[in-house]
């Protein structure tokens, strides 16, 4: 299991997200990204500088802000706004931004792993879909993680930021997702609730997993 952001296929994707955050989170947009940070922390729990997940939480926030949250005024997400106004994007950059715009966040269980081929098969616990992801290393069957899948030239890849949950919480996580109302699954509220449990798990390792993931 890897607790840090997992660089899987394309570090440039991470750089693209950082560039989007800078473009749509500074200057006139500074107050908007600050408000968005409050919304994100409300959904997933507030982190502090000394939390083990602080850096990862911030990476997940920037990804969410750029790819999921609609901007005030335009009603588009930053990545869609960039595509709409991005006459300066070259073909390669445009393709990467389109890949990000088409990405799908989810909560996944690894059902099969092939280290030699650097592929894994994952089950989306929220939507029920199965994906074969290429270019993924260091992940074993039975792992559960929050991440983002996206198309890439006829294959499916994993995005650059991944949050792993403790393996021993797998059954509890599956039960929580199954019990969640459809609206919580559709909005990914249940994914965010479970992410808050992961944050508490990092703070209170002396408490049994089944008491935290409850």
Image (tube, grey):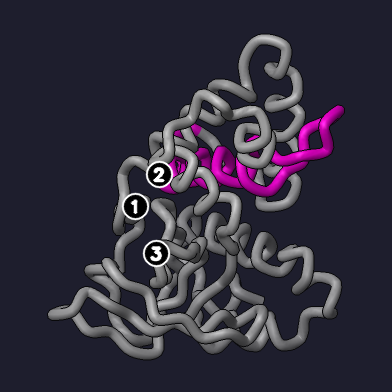
Residue at 33%, 86% in the rendered image: 141
- Pinpoint residue 28: horizontal percent, then vertical percent: 72, 12
Mark closest to the chain's N terminus, 3 or 2: 2
Which numbered mark, 3 or 2, is in the foreground of this view? 3
* Vertical comparison of 127 with 88: above or below: below
Residue 168 seen in the current view: no
- Classify mark 2: helix, strand or loop: helix
> Which image quadrant for residue 126?
bottom right
* Vertical comparison of 201 with 160: above or below: below
As for residue 109 lying within the magenta part, the answer is: no
* Vertical comparison of 6 with 131: above or below: above
Mark closest to the chain's N terminus, 3 or 1: 1
- Classify mark 3: helix, strand or loop: loop
**Residue 153 numbered mark, or none:** 3
* Vertical comparison of 57 with 155: above or below: above
**Residue 13 numbered mark, or none:** 2
Q: Which residues are magenta?
A: 49-78
Mark 3 → mark 1, Cα distance in angstroms: 27 Å
Mark closest to the chain's N terminus, 2 or 1: 1
In the image, 176 versus 29, the foreground residue is: 29
- Pinpoint residue 65: horizontal percent, then vertical percent: 64, 39
Mark 3, Cα crowd under 10 Å, few <14 / some 14-19 / many 20+, is few
> Which image quadrant for residue 184?
bottom right
Which numbered mark, 2 or 1, is in the foreground of this view? 2
As for residue 57 lying within the magenta part, the answer is: yes
Compared across the picture, whether 62 is left or right of 69 comes to left
Residue at 41%, 71% in the rendered image: 154
Mark 3 → mark 2, Cα distance in angstroms: 15 Å
Mark 2, Cα crowd under 10 Å, few <14 / some 14-19 / many 20+, is some
Residue labelled with disc 1: 4
């Amino acid at each position: 299991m890897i607790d840090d952001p997992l660089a899987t296929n394309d570090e440039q994707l991470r750089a693209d997200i950082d560039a989007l955050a800078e473009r749509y989170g500074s200057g006139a947009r500074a107050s908007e990204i600050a408000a968005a940070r409050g919304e994100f922390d409300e959904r997933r729990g507030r982190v502090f500088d000394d939390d083990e997940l602080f850096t990862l939480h911030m990476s997940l926030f920037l990804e969410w802000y750029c790819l999921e949250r609609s901007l005030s005024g335009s009603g588009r997400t930053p990545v869609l706004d960039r595509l709409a106004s991005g006459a300066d994007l070259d073909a390669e950059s445009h393709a990467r931004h389109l890949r990000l715009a088409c990405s799908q966040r989810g909560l996944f269980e690894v059902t099969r792993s092939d280290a030699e081929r650097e592929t894994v098969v994952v089950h989306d616990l929220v939507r029920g879909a199965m994906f074969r992801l290429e270019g993924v290393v260091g992940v074993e069957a039975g792992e559960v993680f929050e991440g983002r899948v996206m198309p890439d030239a006829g294959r499916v890849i994993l995005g650059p930021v991944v949050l792993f949950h403790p393996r021993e919480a797998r059954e509890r996580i599956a039960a929580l997702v199954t019990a969640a109302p459809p609206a919580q699954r559709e909005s990914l509220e249940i994914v965010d609730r479970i992410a808050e449990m992961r944050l508490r798990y990092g703070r209170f390792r002396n408490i049994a997993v089944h008491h935290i993931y409850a």
